[in-house]
Image (spheres, rainbow, N blue to C red):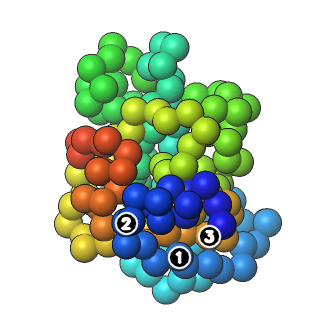
């Protein structure tokens, strides 16, 4: 069990835990998950952490897309956004890169989910470690994280 899975169970959210053998040589964790789990990459979302000038926020976007930092800043009501320092991300969330989940973070960060998630009954997000994903309804993910849906990709 990871903090992400525990958080979903505690909230009584229906999830499906999907596990696969992670290849340490793979550099695209989300695309690896889609391939090994046999899931359309449009349904597999990555968790990114950005810095709004002192406030860290989470962006949950499809693995095949690039985060639009201007879009994220606009959604968050900030002037600008930059990718957060990796060591700060790991200390703040309690997860290692490639396994950062939007659920069960050590410090709950404001979260924004790309609007494309609403086109799917369920999406997959990291379950809190490499090789572990959680399948969850976008509305449940938004409710658990207090998220808004917004256009976040370029």
Q: Which residue is drawn at the image coordinates 71% and 48% (left, top)? A: 96
Q: Are marks 3 and 1 in contact (CB under 8 Å)?
A: yes
The 10 Å Cα crowd at callout 2, few under 14, some 14 to 19, many 20 or more, is some
The 10 Å Cα crowd at callout 1, few under 14, some 14 to 19, many 20 or more, is some
Distance from Cα at disc 3 to Cα at disc 2 = 17 Å
Is 141 positioned to the left or the right of 135 in the image?
Answer: left
Is 148 positioned to the left or the right of 94 in the image?
Answer: left
The answer to whether one can see residue 67 in this image is no
Instruction: Give the residue pinned by disc 1.
Output: 17
What is the number of callouts on the image? 3
Q: Residue 82: x, y in percent? A: 49, 25
Q: Determine which quarter of the picture holds residue 99.
A: bottom right
Is 34 positioned to the left or the right of 3 in the image?
Answer: left
Quadrant of the snapshot with the N terminus: bottom right
Distance from Cα at disc 3 to Cα at disc 1 = 7 Å
- Res. 147 mark: none
* SS for callout 2: loop
Instruction: Give the residue pinned by disc 3.
Output: 132
* SS for callout 3: strand
Nearer to us of marks 3 and 2 is: 2
Instruction: Give the residue pinned by disc 2.
Output: 13
Which residue is most to the right? 24
Tell me if residue 53 comes above or below residue 15 in the rendering. Answer: above
Nearer to us of marks 3 and 1 is: 1
Comparing 102 with 70, the one in front is 102
The 10 Å Cα crowd at callout 3, few under 14, some 14 to 19, many 20 or more, is many
Q: Which residue is drawn at the image coordinates 30% and 26% (left, top)? A: 76
Tell me if residue 87 comes above or below residue 28 in the rendering. Answer: above
């Amino acid at each position: 069990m990871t903090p992400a899975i525990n958080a979903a169970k505690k909230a009584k959210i229906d999830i499906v835990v999907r596990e696969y053998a992670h290849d340490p040589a793979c550099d695209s964790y989300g695309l690896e998950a889609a391939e090994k789990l046999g899931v359309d990459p449009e349904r597999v979302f990555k968790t990114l952490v950005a810095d709004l000038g002192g406030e860290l926020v989470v962006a949950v976007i499809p693995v095949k897309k690039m985060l639009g930092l201007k879009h994220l800043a606009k959604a968050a009501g900030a002037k600008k956004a930059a990718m957060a320092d990796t060591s700060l991300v790991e200390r703040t969330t309690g997860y290692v890169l490639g396994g950062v989940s939007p659920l069960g973070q050590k410090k709950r960060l404001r979260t924004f989910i790309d609007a494309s998630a609403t086109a799917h009954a369920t999406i997959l997000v990291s379950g809190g470690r490499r090789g572990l994903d959680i399948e969850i309804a976008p509305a449940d993910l938004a409710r658990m994280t207090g998220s808004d849906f917004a256009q976040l990709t370029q």
